[in-house]
Amino acid sequence: MRKILLSISFCLIAAASFAQITPTELDSIIKSDSIFFENQMQEVVLIGYGSKKAGSITGSVVQIKASDIIRTPAKSPIQAIQGKAAGVNIITNDEPGAEPVIRIRGLNSISGSANPLYVIDGIETSTINGLNPNDIATIDVLKDASSLAIYGQKGQAGVVLITTKKGKKGDIKISYDSYIGQKFIQRKVDMADSYRYAYYNNTALGSASYFNFEQPYNTDWLDEITRTGEVMNNSISLSGASENANYYFAASNYKEKGILNGTAYERTNIISKTDFKALDGKLKITPFFNLSTERTTSKPLSAFTNAYKQSPIMPVKYPNGRWGAPLLNEDGVNDITGDRYNNVANPAAQLFYTDQQSKAVTLIGSINAELKIVDYLKFNSNFGAQAAWARSYNFTPTRELWLASNPSSTVGDYIDQNPQNPIINSLYQNRSSNYRWNWDNYVTFSKYFGNHNVTVVAGLSRTTTNISETLAGTRLDVPTQSDYWSLDFSTNNEEVAPGSVVQNSNSTPVVSVAYFARAEYEYNNKYLLSASVRREGISSFQADNKYEIFPSVSAGWVITNEDFMDNIDFLDNLKLRGGYGEVGSGYTDNPLNITSFGSGYNYPFGPDQSINPGSNNPYQVDENLTWSTMKEIDLGFDFVMLSNKLTGTFDYYSRRNENILLPIAVPPVLSPVPVFLNSGVVTNKGIELSLKWQDKIGQDFNYWVGGNVSHNKNELKEVYNEELFGAYTGGGLGNGEYTKQVIVGQPLGSFYVYETTGYNSDGAFTYSDERVVAGSYIPTVTYGINLGFMYKNIDFSVDAYGVGGNKLYNGKKAQRFGGENIESDVLDSFYTPSTPNAANPKPSNDVPRASTYYVEKGDYLRINNITLGYTLPPMVKGLDKVRVYATAVNPFLFTKYSGFSPEISGGDGNPLGNAGIELDAYPTNKTFSFGLNVSF
């Protein structure tokens, strides 16, 4: 028993750094007879439509607690858990209001959604960005197919279960949490100054005097478009419980001023969670809602690329107040008049004239009823829904932008450019609404028969998603004003607007209906067995293919509970487990049974090949289109050893996604765009290891060291329709070059570029005859490290995260057209007849070919969080805790990548998009903040 209590004390001490527990409270808890957990393996973990003791789990499930979630101040709970779960790759995005990208055990397909299903207290959602991290009690991540199967196709990319906080019995508790900090760009890229810029471009042009070496300006464009960012968060909660009621109410406000001039984000949350018991405790009603409002002021991220490329010889503004432009006079000096030497926008003017804002209101809510029919049988009915309303505008001062790029011109000159329709400005406004809901009804039978424990869950579920409508309109020449939210299109600009475009669209809802059952058996805390089956139908497919059945089975063996293990003292708990499961994918993001027609196509007929108007079907629907299926084997073990000081878990998995949808090229007369067919197989194989050591030195010093590492191999294994499979490319750079292609035998979204083979006699690159595979942006290795200690009232912790085995494409460096700036390092080693082995080619203004020259290692190790806190001794009766702390988020980054940031999500994480390509990307930030936790 002493070992058990000691183990619990270590866990509580680790959590005390960030929860509401002081060392004195820890001692009283350890001495108490009312300790909830017998040991670490008894902690409760969510598994979908129920919960289970961690020691009885037979699948691959990882839990992150509140103390780990709030350790890193972040706008998103997902961003806060980066590096804390093996097999979970999280790519953060520091742009104000942006969401991180999460991938669980690799990438399963090209066209289907790769985002996990989020379930917040029974509500199925597509995002948790509107949830305050302070309101979360636990996050459980279901990773393997045997765990995911109960959720069906909705969870084919993983399931993230979120449990929000609830009140505890006793007096009313009030907690206040606040922090404020400043944000800075993590790392800069040194660019050539005016002298070196002139030297490089003169060399490229073959003229020693085209650019004068004595320029009046030497502009650092990155400094001109960035600033010190700010972040502030305030949260307050009220909670409590009685015999028949439990309540938790909270409100929070998060504000951020981005490092890019003009960017900002604000979110306000209100959350309510209550439990009411009736019928002598047999009926429990749990209403829940979370309301969030968001306001985002955006600026074009292309400003970062333009700041990288724009020449330092150009000023932000000329002395007369006109914006600087890339113009060169007869003396080779940048001036208000002259010849244009590049086509890069003035990034400062670009930010000044961009006026775009968005507002969003998201409401998630549920009502859950749990009826205990008898002691061993209960019925649950849960209805959950998410509703989101968004509106945005983008005001573009067309005339002013033209004048900014032509500083010597006048309004009259602008009118002369287009005398028939001299557009002054345009205003784009958008309104959208999106809904989804799920209704789950199930019964749970749970009973002990001596040493036998049997639990059976059976029920049905319905989910309707993609209920959305969008109304968008564009008006020209609207009155210039400070607030464009209230501009009435019907009256305010009717006479002065020469034209408008209005678009209204409604999506096709996708309905999923399923019947599911799961049976779990446990004998004498030694032998564990779980099996589930789900029959699911989805409206995305034609009638004959709507329904499919997906089974799963898993088992476990707690070896340390066997009699022959009694004399093995160093091993406290060892459980072997394994499972197999099948999960379908119905592609709920894309209704696939809707046929549409395109008009306005011309066809040549007859001997004279005269043109005849016609129509075609741009999205052919194959009536045989059906489910793709993810089949996975997972083998692993969990252990606790050395008097509960060392805990760990290991997993091996092999995942095979069959019949995935791929775009297949067909004759253009049938469809000018590829159509989807069940055409391929994607595999993911990997291992995951997590370890944690926690111990105590003396009576006052407690410490812990933990970490996890994962290895994943992603591969497009097969393509069934190779004779039809077109060159599926992506990763465009905006200069006519592409960088990615889908290739059998390679990871999805692999870089496919020309290999540089040396220099020709002129010092320009020579290339391979054909493109080569140059790696993938998908990491093969991810890892996390966390450590900390608590000495009396002082707590300290460090978290780190890293990736390896991936490649990145330095897109901003590769997107040259001529006359742009160059990185300072390039000038330290470039080809000349006397330096034929230099690292860089001779100076050139040609559009560069997509090549291995721009492909770099993407490995990095980043210190995510360093926190030092101090809990003040009790001062006032009734004041439970006052803790102050200082936190550094992302203070250090170790990488050989030469760009701004090695962490590039590409926005939505599309493997054929800009994922892994640094182009118009928001740099990683480092944040230094101070915070306060108060509870009473």
Image (cartoon, rainbow, N blue to C red):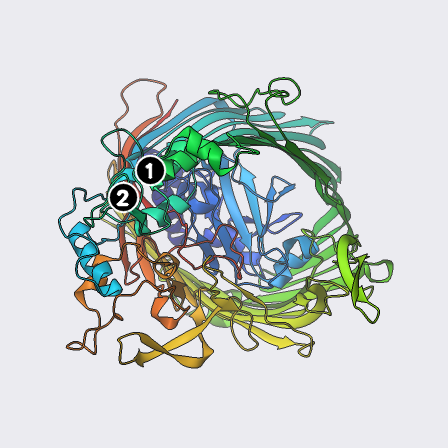
Give the side of residue 90 with respect to residue 279, left or right: left
Give the CA separation, mark 1 to mark 2.
8 Å
Which residue has dot 1 on it?
A: 348
Asked if the residue under mark 2 is in contact with the one under mark 1, i.e. CB atoms within 8 Å, the reply is: yes
- In which quadrant will I find the C terminus? top left
Q: Quadrant of residue 464?
A: top right
Dot 1 alpha-carbon crowd within 10 angstroms: few under 14, some 14 to 19, many 20 or more: many
Which residue has dot 2 on it?
A: 221
| Residue 4 screen position, x and y as percent | 41, 51
| Residue 647 screen position, x and y as percent | 40, 59
Q: Amino acid at mark 1?
A: Ala
Up-down relation of residue 354 to residue 858 (above or below): above
Say which of 165 and 922 sits in front: 922
Q: Amino acid at mark 2?
A: Trp
Say which of 15 and 346 sits in front: 346
Q: Secondary structure at mark 1?
A: helix
Residue at the left extreme? 214
| Residue 510 screen position, x and y as percent | 75, 48
Instruction: Indicate which disc, 1 or 2, sits on the residue closer to the N terminus.
Output: 2
Dot 2 alpha-carbon crowd within 10 angstroms: few under 14, some 14 to 19, many 20 or more: many
Q: Residue at image x 65%, y 73%?
A: 725
Please give the label number shown on residue 708: none
Q: Is residue 317 visible?
A: yes
Residue at the right extreme? 544
Q: Residue at image x 64%, y 21%?
A: 494
| Residue 391 screen position, x and y as percent | 58, 30
Q: Is residue 693 visible?
A: no
Up-down relation of residue 883 to residue 405 (above or below): above
